[in-house]
Amino acid sequence: MAASPTAAATAPRTPTRTPAETLARTVSHVLVTAGPGDTFESIAAALGSKATAAELRQANGLAAGDLAVGTKVAVPVRDDAGVVPVDALATALRKGGGTPPALYVPGSATLDGFQGRVALHALEIANGDATGEAYGYRLEFWSTASAAAKGGVLDLQAQVDGPLFTVAAGPFAAKLTSARAGDRFAWTRNGVEFAVRMEGTGATPEQVAASLEAK
């Protein structure tokens, strides 16, 4: 007779999180995916963070050396920047010196629609800083267990629950595909493609797109 499986063999495995993913379980940190030409300093600046390269390396468990393209780095954010550090992101998009796309971010209507339980969780920026790089961005917003901000100040202890929606521009919009019909909405402004893809429930991508504010 075959032996019965042990408890250890049948118990579900707990997913192993990287240091970056662990830090980003609250809104105190945002995951930034490094692109061509990015440095620890540039990705920190994109969020208005004052974290140094050494601090980011240590916190994220990364070895010394160049920042490899595609590396996800958890960057600490300032509580006074609100749900989205608009000024810092806009400056980062203009770094390449060209004309960046409009920055579509959640406005008060978006936040009200999700009862304030939404925060920026991850992002990627292409700012023309590297040779041949187009302009664009991907902003991933997640739901939070409690209101992400109170009185305009970010609650750094608020935990993220799961993905809500993603806003993309430029080359990232074309990559923002959806397997489910009706989960993606796209539009064009000044020759640049933008898209919203719903990850959670409670709103349509058209509704979210209409509630966004262009900066």
Image (cartoon, rainbow, N blue to C red):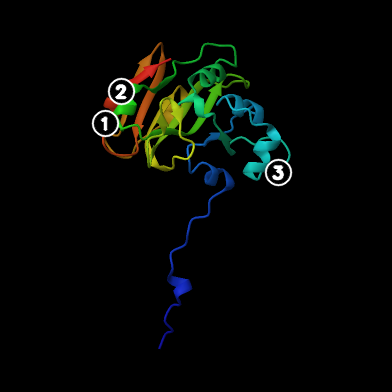
CB atoms of marks 3 and 1 within 8 Å: no
Q: Nearer the viewer, mark 2 or mark 1?
A: 2
Image spot of residue 91 (x, y percent): 55, 16
Residue named by callout 3: 63
Horizontally, residue 147 falls left or right of residue 51, namely left
Residue 144 appears in the figure: yes
Spatial CA span between label 3 and label 2: 42 Å
Quarter placement of the N terminus: bottom left
Mark 1 element type? loop
Which of 62 and 51 lies nearest the eye of the viewer? 51
Q: Please state the horizontal and vertical placement of residue 19, each as a whole percent of the image.
A: 58, 47
Give the Cα separation between the discs numbered 2 and 1.
14 Å
Residue 158 x %, y %: 44, 40
Q: Earlier in the sequence, mark 3 or mark 1?
A: 3
**Residue at far right of view:** 64
Q: Secondary structure at mark 3?
A: loop
